Amino acid sequence: MITCYTHAFGIPTPGCDIKDACWVNLTAPSESEIRDVSQSLDIPLDFLTDPLDLDERARIEIDDNCLLIVLHTPVRRTAGDSVPFATVPLGIVFKNGCLVTISVQPIDIMEFFLNRRVKNFAPDQHARFVIQIFNQTAILFLKYLTEINKKTNASEMELHRAMKNEELIKLLNLEKSLVYFTTSIKANEIIMARIQRADIIKMNEQEHELLEDAITENLQAIHMTRIYSNILSGMMDAFASIISNNLNVVMKFLTTVTIMLMIPNLVFSFFGQNVKLPFQEHEAGVIVTLVVAVLATVGGVWMVVKRRLF
């Protein structure tokens, strides 16, 4: 889908022609839409197709006065997916006074700008726009990291009584999300550092300060990801040990119960032989057998409790 925007009255206004637009947003575009944008703005075709690859690395590329920036942004998976969070590439292309953003699916970052949730946003101020994208990406990483931490704490509440693998699998999927985040945030850091060092994008003093703020937010996301990843790894090890220990306790209980049930069974088996036995002719023989079985069972239970075997 292609959406073109101009800058009118301080807000992005859709509905203009591609050549007249200051911002063109491509979301899951078709091949024909990609060719139209490439021909209209004279952009290399691979600059528009590369960001659609989910495995595309974060990078900066310049070709024929056309600048491509690929960064990774966080996305929330649907309820049916096992991994709750992941990252997707977002391509940003500069050419002929127009900025093009392209992604393989709708992402929250672009919605922030379209819903006017980003202060001082102007689509025709391309340098500020790009820096704000980096800043909002880092902020969204921090938001999702907080949600991952809450999910981890919720799983921790089930830690002590867990005997199945469901909670362990949940933690494993959260750890996968953290792996995606760690790789993407570090790659974005390299891109921002390169933009800060080199004169790739013309920036004024205020935009340089905004870039420094974005780098700071990104560094905080890196530290939080590292901390949560370490906590999650330790919790998974503890989780596996506790599940194993809980299963051992259950097996110990069942073994003890089985042994206790075998004691009266042995007594009744002894008195059920087809040979002459004590109290066989006595009218209280059944009662004596029951008393012996009960006393033997009580004695077995007392011994187990005394030795703390149960």
Image (tube, rainbow, N blue to C red):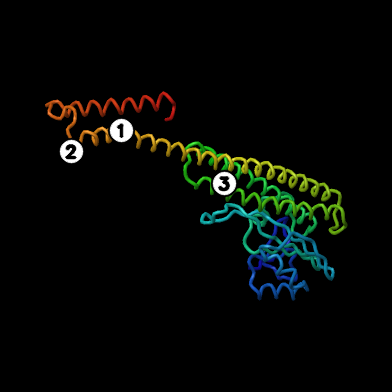
Please tell me in which quadrant of the rendered image residue 122 appears: bottom right
Is the C terminus in the top left, top right, bottom left or bottom right quadrant?
top left
Residue under the point 24% across and 34% down: 270
Q: Secondary structure at mark 1?
A: helix
Mark 1 residue type: Ile
1 vs 3, front mark: 1
Give the residue at mark 2. Answer: 274
The dot on residue 171 is 3
Q: Secondary structure at mark 3?
A: helix
The image shows residue 112 at horizontal and vertical percentages of 66, 53
The image shows residue 298 at horizontal and vertical percentages of 31, 26
Residue under the point 65% across and 44% down: 229
Q: Mark 1 vs mark 3: which is more N-terminal?
A: 3
State whether residue 271 is above or below residue 3: above
The dot on residue 263 is 1
Mark 1 to mark 3 CA distance (whole Å): 44 Å
Residue under the point 78% across and 59% down: 126
Residue nearer the viewer, 273 or 287: 273
Mark 2 to mark 1 CA distance (whole Å): 20 Å
State whether residue 172 is above or below residue 277: below
